[in-house]
Image (cartoon, rainbow, N blue to C red):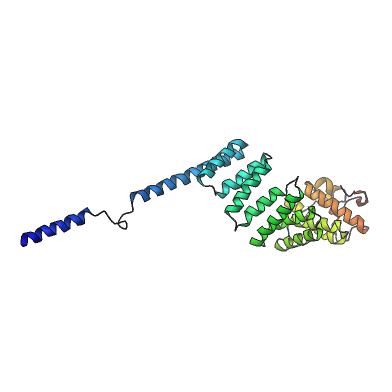
Amino acid sequence: MKSQRIVFGLLVLLVACSKPPSSEAAPPEHDAGDRRAAGKSKARLFQFFREASDAKKEGRLEEAIELYHQALELNPEHEGSLVDLSHVYRLLGQRQDAVQVLDRLRRTQPRLPRPYFLLAEVLSEEPASAEDLQRAADLYTQALDLEPNVLGPRLGLADVAFRQGHLEDARECFRLALGTDPNCLRALRGLATIHLRSDRPAEAIPLLVKALELGTKAQGRADVPSEMDTQASFADSTITTGENRSAWLALARAAHALGGYPADVPPRFRHPSPQTVGAED
Protein backbone atom coordinates (compact mmCIF):
# COMPACT_ATOMS: atom_id res chain seq x y z
CA MET A 1 0.00 0.00 0.00
CA LYS A 2 2.80 2.33 0.86
CA SER A 3 4.44 1.75 -2.51
CA GLN A 4 1.11 2.44 -4.24
CA ARG A 5 0.76 5.77 -2.45
CA ILE A 6 4.27 6.74 -3.50
CA VAL A 7 3.56 5.88 -7.13
CA PHE A 8 0.28 7.84 -7.02
CA GLY A 9 2.07 10.87 -5.57
CA LEU A 10 4.69 10.76 -8.28
CA LEU A 11 1.97 10.63 -10.95
CA VAL A 12 0.22 13.70 -9.47
CA LEU A 13 3.51 15.58 -9.40
CA LEU A 14 4.27 14.69 -13.01
CA VAL A 15 0.83 15.88 -14.16
CA ALA A 16 1.23 19.17 -12.30
CA CYS A 17 4.64 19.78 -13.80
CA SER A 18 3.39 19.05 -17.31
CA LYS A 19 0.64 21.77 -17.22
CA PRO A 20 1.38 24.91 -19.28
CA PRO A 21 1.93 28.11 -17.27
CA SER A 22 -1.15 30.20 -16.52
CA SER A 23 -1.83 33.21 -18.76
CA GLU A 24 -2.06 35.30 -15.60
CA ALA A 25 1.45 34.34 -14.54
CA ALA A 26 3.04 35.34 -17.86
CA PRO A 27 1.42 36.77 -21.02
CA PRO A 28 1.50 34.61 -24.13
CA GLU A 29 4.48 35.33 -26.32
CA HIS A 30 2.30 36.24 -29.30
CA ASP A 31 0.69 39.13 -27.32
CA ALA A 32 4.09 40.65 -26.67
CA GLY A 33 4.90 40.21 -30.35
CA ASP A 34 1.70 41.99 -31.34
CA ARG A 35 2.59 44.93 -29.12
CA ARG A 36 6.06 45.17 -30.62
CA ALA A 37 4.60 45.08 -34.13
CA ALA A 38 2.06 47.78 -33.27
CA GLY A 39 4.82 49.96 -31.85
CA LYS A 40 6.90 49.56 -35.01
CA SER A 41 3.88 50.37 -37.19
CA LYS A 42 3.18 53.55 -35.22
CA ALA A 43 6.81 54.62 -35.49
CA ARG A 44 6.75 54.06 -39.26
CA LEU A 45 3.51 56.05 -39.56
CA PHE A 46 5.00 59.08 -37.84
CA GLN A 47 8.19 58.73 -39.86
CA PHE A 48 6.17 58.87 -43.09
CA PHE A 49 4.15 61.79 -41.73
CA ARG A 50 7.26 63.80 -40.79
CA GLU A 51 8.90 63.11 -44.14
CA ALA A 52 5.70 64.13 -45.94
CA SER A 53 5.48 67.35 -43.92
CA ASP A 54 9.09 68.20 -44.78
CA ALA A 55 8.46 67.51 -48.46
CA LYS A 56 5.36 69.74 -48.36
CA LYS A 57 7.28 72.62 -46.76
CA GLU A 58 10.02 72.32 -49.38
CA GLY A 59 7.56 72.32 -52.27
CA ARG A 60 8.04 68.67 -53.22
CA LEU A 61 4.31 68.18 -53.42
CA GLU A 62 4.10 64.99 -55.48
CA GLU A 63 6.55 63.31 -53.10
CA ALA A 64 4.50 64.55 -50.15
CA ILE A 65 1.35 62.97 -51.61
CA GLU A 66 3.07 59.59 -51.88
CA LEU A 67 4.36 59.76 -48.30
CA TYR A 68 0.97 60.78 -46.90
CA HIS A 69 -0.59 57.81 -48.69
CA GLN A 70 2.03 55.52 -47.14
CA ALA A 71 1.14 56.87 -43.70
CA LEU A 72 -2.55 56.31 -44.40
CA GLU A 73 -1.91 52.70 -45.39
CA LEU A 74 -0.75 52.17 -41.80
CA ASN A 75 -3.64 54.14 -40.28
CA PRO A 76 -6.45 55.08 -42.70
CA GLU A 77 -7.96 57.46 -40.12
CA HIS A 78 -4.83 59.46 -39.24
CA GLU A 79 -6.17 63.02 -39.00
CA GLY A 80 -2.92 64.88 -39.63
CA SER A 81 -2.19 62.96 -42.82
CA LEU A 82 -5.71 63.45 -44.16
CA VAL A 83 -5.76 67.20 -43.42
CA ASP A 84 -2.30 67.83 -44.87
CA LEU A 85 -2.96 65.64 -47.90
CA SER A 86 -6.08 67.67 -48.69
CA HIS A 87 -4.04 70.87 -48.41
CA VAL A 88 -1.43 69.55 -50.87
CA TYR A 89 -4.19 68.73 -53.34
CA ARG A 90 -5.53 72.27 -52.95
CA LEU A 91 -2.06 73.70 -53.62
CA LEU A 92 -1.91 71.64 -56.81
CA GLY A 93 -5.38 72.78 -57.88
CA GLN A 94 -6.79 69.26 -57.52
CA ARG A 95 -9.97 70.42 -55.84
CA GLN A 96 -11.97 67.22 -56.28
CA ASP A 97 -9.20 65.12 -54.74
CA ALA A 98 -9.15 67.46 -51.75
CA VAL A 99 -12.93 67.12 -51.40
CA GLN A 100 -12.70 63.32 -51.42
CA VAL A 101 -9.99 63.28 -48.75
CA LEU A 102 -11.89 65.67 -46.46
CA ASP A 103 -15.14 63.78 -46.98
CA ARG A 104 -13.28 60.68 -45.83
CA LEU A 105 -12.09 62.59 -42.74
CA ARG A 106 -15.65 63.73 -42.03
CA ARG A 107 -16.92 60.15 -42.15
CA THR A 108 -14.23 58.94 -39.74
CA GLN A 109 -14.76 61.82 -37.27
CA PRO A 110 -18.45 62.72 -37.49
CA ARG A 111 -18.58 64.34 -34.04
CA LEU A 112 -15.82 66.89 -34.61
CA PRO A 113 -16.55 70.27 -36.28
CA ARG A 114 -13.16 70.59 -38.02
CA PRO A 115 -13.78 68.12 -40.89
CA TYR A 116 -17.07 69.84 -41.77
CA PHE A 117 -15.38 73.26 -41.71
CA LEU A 118 -12.43 72.21 -43.89
CA LEU A 119 -14.66 70.49 -46.43
CA ALA A 120 -16.94 73.54 -46.60
CA GLU A 121 -13.92 75.79 -47.18
CA VAL A 122 -12.86 73.79 -50.22
CA LEU A 123 -16.37 73.62 -51.66
CA SER A 124 -16.86 77.39 -51.31
CA GLU A 125 -13.61 78.29 -53.09
CA GLU A 126 -13.97 80.07 -56.41
CA PRO A 127 -15.17 78.97 -58.83
CA ALA A 128 -17.99 77.44 -56.84
CA SER A 129 -21.31 76.37 -58.32
CA ALA A 130 -24.61 77.17 -56.65
CA GLU A 131 -24.77 73.52 -55.61
CA ASP A 132 -21.29 73.69 -54.06
CA LEU A 133 -22.18 76.86 -52.16
CA GLN A 134 -25.32 75.29 -50.74
CA ARG A 135 -23.44 72.17 -49.69
CA ALA A 136 -20.80 74.39 -48.06
CA ALA A 137 -23.53 76.26 -46.18
CA ASP A 138 -24.96 72.96 -44.94
CA LEU A 139 -21.52 71.79 -43.77
CA TYR A 140 -20.79 75.08 -41.96
CA THR A 141 -24.17 74.72 -40.24
CA GLN A 142 -23.35 71.16 -39.19
CA ALA A 143 -20.04 72.34 -37.73
CA LEU A 144 -21.88 75.02 -35.74
CA ASP A 145 -24.39 72.47 -34.50
CA LEU A 146 -21.46 70.56 -33.00
CA GLU A 147 -19.71 73.67 -31.62
CA PRO A 148 -21.82 76.86 -31.70
CA ASN A 149 -19.10 79.27 -30.57
CA VAL A 150 -16.37 78.33 -33.04
CA LEU A 151 -15.54 81.36 -35.19
CA GLY A 152 -14.35 79.88 -38.50
CA PRO A 153 -17.59 78.13 -39.53
CA ARG A 154 -19.63 81.19 -38.51
CA LEU A 155 -17.57 83.47 -40.76
CA GLY A 156 -17.63 80.91 -43.55
CA LEU A 157 -21.41 80.67 -43.35
CA ALA A 158 -21.65 84.47 -43.45
CA ASP A 159 -19.50 84.65 -46.57
CA VAL A 160 -21.51 81.96 -48.34
CA ALA A 161 -24.81 83.63 -47.42
CA PHE A 162 -23.47 86.93 -48.77
CA ARG A 163 -22.44 85.32 -52.06
CA GLN A 164 -25.86 83.68 -52.32
CA GLY A 165 -27.50 87.09 -51.92
CA HIS A 166 -28.95 86.29 -48.48
CA LEU A 167 -27.87 89.57 -46.89
CA GLU A 168 -29.93 89.29 -43.72
CA ASP A 169 -28.58 85.81 -43.00
CA ALA A 170 -25.04 87.06 -43.60
CA ARG A 171 -25.67 90.10 -41.38
CA GLU A 172 -26.82 87.87 -38.52
CA CYS A 173 -23.82 85.56 -38.90
CA PHE A 174 -21.36 88.46 -38.75
CA ARG A 175 -23.15 89.85 -35.70
CA LEU A 176 -22.90 86.50 -33.95
CA ALA A 177 -19.21 86.31 -34.87
CA LEU A 178 -18.65 89.72 -33.27
CA GLY A 179 -20.45 88.44 -30.19
CA THR A 180 -17.80 85.73 -29.97
CA ASP A 181 -14.89 88.05 -30.83
CA PRO A 182 -15.65 91.81 -30.86
CA ASN A 183 -12.28 92.49 -32.52
CA CYS A 184 -12.70 90.08 -35.43
CA LEU A 185 -11.55 92.11 -38.44
CA ARG A 186 -13.24 89.86 -40.95
CA ALA A 187 -16.59 90.23 -39.18
CA LEU A 188 -16.21 94.00 -38.79
CA ARG A 189 -15.46 94.47 -42.48
CA GLY A 190 -18.09 91.97 -43.57
CA LEU A 191 -20.88 93.53 -41.52
CA ALA A 192 -19.89 97.02 -42.68
CA THR A 193 -20.03 95.87 -46.31
CA ILE A 194 -23.54 94.51 -45.82
CA HIS A 195 -24.65 97.77 -44.19
CA LEU A 196 -23.33 99.68 -47.20
CA ARG A 197 -25.09 97.33 -49.61
CA SER A 198 -28.30 97.92 -47.62
CA ASP A 199 -27.96 101.74 -47.74
CA ARG A 200 -27.13 101.98 -44.04
CA PRO A 201 -23.86 103.97 -44.14
CA ALA A 202 -24.24 105.39 -40.63
CA GLU A 203 -24.09 101.85 -39.20
CA ALA A 204 -21.10 100.96 -41.36
CA ILE A 205 -18.88 103.87 -40.27
CA PRO A 206 -18.09 102.84 -36.64
CA LEU A 207 -17.36 99.30 -37.79
CA LEU A 208 -14.94 100.55 -40.46
CA VAL A 209 -13.21 102.94 -38.06
CA LYS A 210 -12.68 100.10 -35.58
CA ALA A 211 -11.42 97.84 -38.36
CA LEU A 212 -8.88 100.48 -39.40
CA GLU A 213 -7.76 101.05 -35.82
CA LEU A 214 -7.22 97.33 -35.29
CA GLY A 215 -5.73 96.75 -38.73
CA THR A 216 -3.13 99.49 -38.46
CA LYS A 217 -2.27 98.50 -34.89
CA ALA A 218 -1.58 94.96 -36.08
CA GLN A 219 1.04 96.44 -38.43
CA GLY A 220 2.74 98.30 -35.60
CA ARG A 221 1.37 101.65 -36.76
CA ALA A 222 -1.08 102.44 -33.98
CA ASP A 223 0.43 105.90 -33.38
CA VAL A 224 0.67 107.99 -36.53
CA PRO A 225 3.20 110.85 -36.08
CA SER A 226 1.59 114.26 -35.91
CA GLU A 227 3.28 115.44 -39.10
CA MET A 228 1.59 112.55 -40.90
CA ASP A 229 -1.80 113.13 -39.29
CA THR A 230 -3.35 114.61 -42.42
CA GLN A 231 -6.07 113.45 -44.73
CA ALA A 232 -3.78 112.73 -47.65
CA SER A 233 -0.79 111.11 -45.95
CA PHE A 234 -2.61 108.22 -44.33
CA ALA A 235 -3.22 106.39 -47.60
CA ASP A 236 0.46 106.64 -48.51
CA SER A 237 2.01 105.90 -45.12
CA THR A 238 -0.30 103.76 -43.04
CA ILE A 239 -2.59 101.73 -45.30
CA THR A 240 -0.20 99.06 -46.46
CA THR A 241 -2.48 96.05 -46.92
CA GLY A 242 -5.39 95.41 -49.23
CA GLU A 243 -7.75 94.88 -46.31
CA ASN A 244 -6.91 98.24 -44.71
CA ARG A 245 -7.14 100.07 -48.01
CA SER A 246 -10.52 98.48 -48.75
CA ALA A 247 -11.82 99.58 -45.35
CA TRP A 248 -10.47 103.10 -45.90
CA LEU A 249 -12.21 103.40 -49.27
CA ALA A 250 -15.43 101.90 -47.89
CA LEU A 251 -15.34 104.48 -45.11
CA ALA A 252 -15.00 107.23 -47.73
CA ARG A 253 -18.03 105.89 -49.62
CA ALA A 254 -20.07 105.79 -46.40
CA ALA A 255 -19.05 109.36 -45.56
CA HIS A 256 -19.95 110.55 -49.05
CA ALA A 257 -23.39 108.92 -48.72
CA LEU A 258 -23.92 110.83 -45.47
CA GLY A 259 -22.66 114.11 -46.93
CA GLY A 260 -19.44 114.12 -44.90
CA TYR A 261 -17.48 112.40 -42.17
CA PRO A 262 -18.99 112.31 -38.67
CA ALA A 263 -17.02 114.40 -36.18
CA ASP A 264 -15.72 111.38 -34.28
CA VAL A 265 -13.91 109.87 -37.28
CA PRO A 266 -10.16 110.46 -36.76
CA PRO A 267 -8.65 112.81 -39.38
CA ARG A 268 -6.01 110.22 -40.32
CA PHE A 269 -8.77 107.87 -41.50
CA ARG A 270 -10.42 110.45 -43.76
CA HIS A 271 -10.05 110.41 -47.53
CA PRO A 272 -9.10 113.83 -48.96
CA SER A 273 -11.83 113.58 -51.62
CA PRO A 274 -14.47 111.03 -50.58
CA GLN A 275 -16.77 112.15 -53.38
CA THR A 276 -14.26 110.83 -55.93
CA VAL A 277 -14.19 107.28 -54.54
CA GLY A 278 -16.11 105.00 -56.88
CA ALA A 279 -18.23 102.06 -55.83
CA GLU A 280 -15.61 99.58 -57.05
CA ASP A 281 -12.45 101.37 -55.81
Q: Is residue 152 visible?
A: no
Asked whether, in this view, residue 147 is left or right of residue 133, the answer is: left
Which of 74 and 223 lies nearest the eye of the viewer? 74
Q: Residue at x 82, y 60 (%)?
A: 206
Which of 12 and 213 lies nearest the eye of the viewer? 12
Q: Position of residue 250 (x, y in %)?
A: 85, 53
Asked whether, in this view, residue 185 is left or right of residue 203, the answer is: left
Q: Residue at x 6, y 62 (%)?
A: 2
Q: Is residue 179 visible?
A: yes
Which of 118 and 60 lies nearest the eye of the viewer? 118
Q: Position of residue 42 (x, y in %)?
A: 47, 46
Q: Is residue 219 above or below residue 51?
A: below
Q: Residue at x 59, y 39 (%)?
A: 65
Choose top left, top right, bottom left or bottom right for residue 200: bottom right
Which of 186 and 126 lies nearest the eye of the viewer? 126
Q: Position of residue 1 (x, y in %)?
A: 5, 62
Q: Is residue 188 above or below residue 125?
A: below
Choose top left, top right, bottom left or bottom right for residue 126: top right
Q: Position of residue 66 (x, y in %)?
A: 57, 38
- How many labels, in total? 0
